[in-house]
Amino acid sequence: MPTNDKTLLEPTQAQLYTMLILRELGASTHLQLLYFVTDSELMNDIELVLALRALTENGLAAVIERPTEGLYRLTEAGIETLSFFENHMRHSIATAICEKAPGYRERYEKENQFSTAITRERRGDYVAHLCLMEGDIAAMELKLNVPLQEMAEKLTGAWEKHAGEIYRYLLSQLNEEET
């Protein structure tokens, strides 16, 4: 049963639900976690931020650093702690998390494989950061400078569709022997 905006979770409850969410979703960005909790009406953004901060400070969650943005994941201590206290959660909320998570997990795993970001340089041009991930490892990173934000958005939008073929092409070209 989702919470509503007027009912705030106790910090410990928010941390337990966040650990369960991380276990069910797998490694996720802050934005992905925020989308999941707000879409599911499980907690608000402030509760999530405070829970993530407490979990990382206490070693129950960690951030996997990546070129474009970090991924939160449960640590072994977090998994163990969750197993001790999982029965202290409201059954209806825990069930809702476990039922909703698989669809999000599949989508998030795909999103996290093709990581993108756009930044603006001081001189005014835009940089499209494109990264192809293999698990926690960046298999390929590209930074492309372009003059317009629209161009950067087009590059990041096309990245997922073409990253694999670009990677294969670069490997084949760079591995060719000189004739």
Image (tube, rainbow, N blue to C red):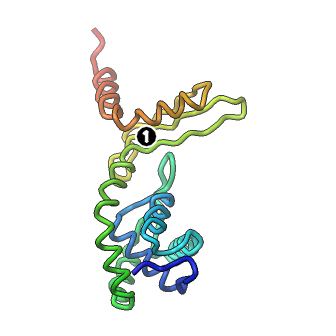
Q: 24 or 175, which is in the foreground? A: 24
- Quadrant containing the C terminus is top left
Quadrant location, the N terminus: bottom left
Q: Position of residue 78 (x, y in %)?
A: 40, 77
Q: Amino acid at mark 1?
A: Cys
Please name whichever residue, 60 or 112, is drawn nearer the observer in this view of the structure.
112
| Above or below: residue 101 compared with residue 149 | below
Q: Is residue 20 left or right of residue 128?
A: left
- Counting labels gives 1
Residue drawn at the location 54% of the way across and 31% of the way down: 152
Q: Residue at x 33, y 66 (%)?
A: 101
Q: Position of residue 130 (x, y in %)?
A: 46, 37
Instruction: List x then y, in percent, for residue 57.
Output: 55, 74
Q: Is residue 143 left or right of residue 168?
A: right
Spot occupied by residue 85 in the image (x, y as percentages of width and height): 38, 88
For disc 1, the neighbor class at 10 Å (few under 14, some 14 to 19, many from 20) is: many
- At mark 1, the secondary structure is strand
Residue 28's quadrant in the figure? Answer: bottom left
- Vertically, is 161 above or below 105? above
Residue occupying the point 30% across, 60% down: 103
Extreme-top residue of the structure: 179
Q: Which residue is mark 1?
A: 131
Q: Residue furthest bottom?
A: 88
